[in-house]
């Protein structure tokens, strides 16, 4: 009897426990039995926990409370974007989502995240960007490309924390349309430098710029120097769209200024004579005359190679030396009035001689000016019968101007030189010398020697 009583009590107790467990089980998973979603369910970023299918559909189609999460520097920012988004879901597909939830998800209240692609979705990206810009912390620095400043110093790129909204908005719209999770690490959507200091094109430009900055093209004018240096070149360098360019129009200006400063061709000179003090002499073929076009070409060639060099300009015509006195201390002095010639070498008189110059008529007078000897020749015939009306042999021929005039011996004069002979029996413009004087001058003079006629 006692055993039966104990068994009865045990059955009753077991029944009570079973009822209690069933009650707990039902309470814990009542949604399962009542056709609702489990207690912790997200469908397409909408919280549908414990909702019926109809309630879930209404909530998902409604934009109220629709939000995304932006993460910056390990901090999350939940941002309501409902004002920028409109979605539409099919009830049958929402119901299918519910069937994917297991009983144990209900029983243990496990988090369930499901993605359901909307049947239609509209994202107003303009409104979305305004919403995000109002909620995302402002950038502390802004991204910029590497570039060369006005002095062509390389300024390195900057990686800022400014947002590329075009990329971010496109990703959000895509995820909304596909029902994906809307969680974004903001650093993945920063603007990035498009040009970096480590890029090959930048490195190449930097190397070329450095070479230009180290350049020195020097032109010597005696003791004076004119220079194209790196600082001058840099003013005309520019870097744009990955291309380094050197403007070259300034080179002609540089050469033109040198010409104005150093050209002496055709200029009037002061000359200290042997017998008549200082005289003013104009013209003649001697003088520095820079060939500007060829000098410019020479400079451009060096610039193209980034090559430094010390050189002289290309000249059309030259003088004996640079400086205010371009005649120097070695020259032939021809005094037409006195009919007297002197030859000085390094400031010392080597010889002097009487001569006969050209007949003082327009077509036969000896041309005045500072000339220079441009040739020397032995046993030469001067003139032709057909053109000049004479064909004369000379032993020593030393031309000095572009009119074909020169110094030479004149044995046909039989030793008669100087005085006023030139006024009635003058030459055709040449300076006639005694044979021995012509020989001595020929043996001592060098091509290029100034010949001063006044």
Image: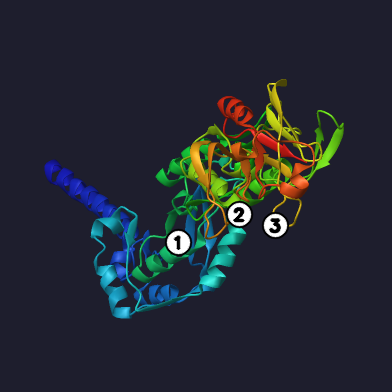
Q: CA distance from mark 3 to mark 1?
A: 89 Å
Q: In the picture, residue 114 is in which quadrant?
A: bottom left
Checking the image for residue 167, the label placed there is 1
Kind of element beneath mark 3: loop
Foreground residue among 274 and 36 = 274
Q: Nearer the viewer, mark 3 or mark 1?
A: 3
Rate crowding at label 1 as few (under 14), some (14 to 19) or many (20 or more) other CA atoms within 10 Å.
Answer: few
Instruction: Mark 1 or mark 2: name the one nearer the start of the chain.
Output: 1
Foreground residue among 399 and 448 = 399
The chosen color scheme is rainbow
x and y, in percent, of residue 185 in the image = 45, 51
Foreground residue among 126 and 197 = 197
**Residue in the image at 51% along x and 74% along y:** 124
x and y, in percent, of residue 299 in the image = 54, 44
Q: In the picture, residue 183 is in which quadrant?
A: bottom left
x and y, in percent, of residue 275 in the image = 84, 29
Residue that numbered label 2 is attached to: 249
Residue 133 visible in the snapshot: yes
Q: Nearer the viewer, mark 2 or mark 3?
A: 3
Q: CA distance from mark 2 to mark 3?
A: 45 Å
Instruction: Mark 2 or mark 3: name the one nearer the start of the chain.
Output: 2
x and y, in percent, of residue 419 in the image = 79, 37
**Residue in the image at 61% along x and 27% along y:** 436
């Amino acid at each position: 009897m006692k055993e039966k009583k104990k068994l009865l009590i045990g059955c009753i107790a077991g029944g009570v426990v079973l009822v209690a467990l069933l009650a707990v089980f039902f309470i814990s998973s009542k949604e399962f039995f009542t056709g609702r979603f489990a207690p912790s369910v997200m469908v397409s970023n909408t919280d549908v926990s414990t909702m019926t299918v109809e309630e879930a559909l209404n909530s998902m189609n409604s934009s109220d409370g629709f939000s995304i999460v932006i993460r910056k520097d390990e901090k999350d920012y939940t941002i309501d974007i409902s004002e920028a988004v409109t979605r539409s879901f099919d009830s049958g597909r929402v119901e299918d989502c519910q069937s994917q939830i297991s009983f144990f998800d209900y029983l243990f209240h496990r988090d369930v995240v499901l993605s359901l692609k909307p049947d239609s979705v509209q994202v107003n990206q303009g409104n979305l960007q305004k919403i995000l810009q109002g909620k995302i912390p402002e950038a502390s620095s802004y991204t910029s490309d590497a570039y060369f400043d006005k002095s062509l110093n390389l300024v390195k790129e900057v990686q800022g924390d400014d947002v590329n909204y075009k990329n971010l908005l496109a990703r959000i719209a895509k995820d909304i349309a596909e029902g994906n999770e809307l969680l974004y690490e903001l650093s993945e959507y920063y603007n990035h430098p498009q040009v970096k200091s480590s890029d090959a094109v930048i490195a190449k430009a930097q190397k070329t710029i450095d070479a230009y900055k180290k350049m020195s093209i020097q032109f010597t004018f005696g003791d004076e120097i004119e220079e194209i240096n790196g600082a001058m070149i840099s003013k005309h360098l520019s870097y744009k769209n990955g291309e380094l360019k050197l403007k070259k129009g300034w080179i002609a200006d540089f050469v033109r200024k040198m010409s104005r400063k150093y050209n002496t061709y055709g200029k009037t000179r002061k000359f200290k004579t042997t017998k008549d003090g200082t005289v003013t002499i104009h013209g003649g073929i001697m003088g520095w005359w820079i060939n500007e076009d060829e000098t410019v070409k020479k400079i451009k060639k060096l610039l193209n190679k980034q090559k430094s060099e010390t050189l002289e300009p290309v000249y059309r015509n030259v003088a004996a030396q640079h400086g205010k006195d371009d005649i120097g201390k070695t020259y032939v002095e021809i005094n037409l009035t006195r009919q007297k010639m002197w030859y000085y070498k390094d400031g010392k008189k080597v010889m002097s001689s009487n001569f006969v110059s050209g007949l003082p008529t327009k077509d036969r007078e000896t041309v005045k000016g500072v000339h220079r000897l441009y040739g020397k020749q032995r046993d030469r015939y001067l003139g032709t019968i057909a053109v000049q009306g004479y064909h004369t042999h000379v032993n020593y021929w030393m031309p000095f101007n572009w009119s074909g005039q020169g110094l030479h011996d004149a044995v046909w004069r039989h030793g008669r030189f100087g005085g006023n002979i030139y006024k009635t029996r003058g030459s055709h413009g040449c300076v006639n010398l005694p044979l021995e004087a012509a020989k001595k001058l020929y043996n001592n003079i060098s091509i290029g020697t100034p010949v001063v006629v006044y």
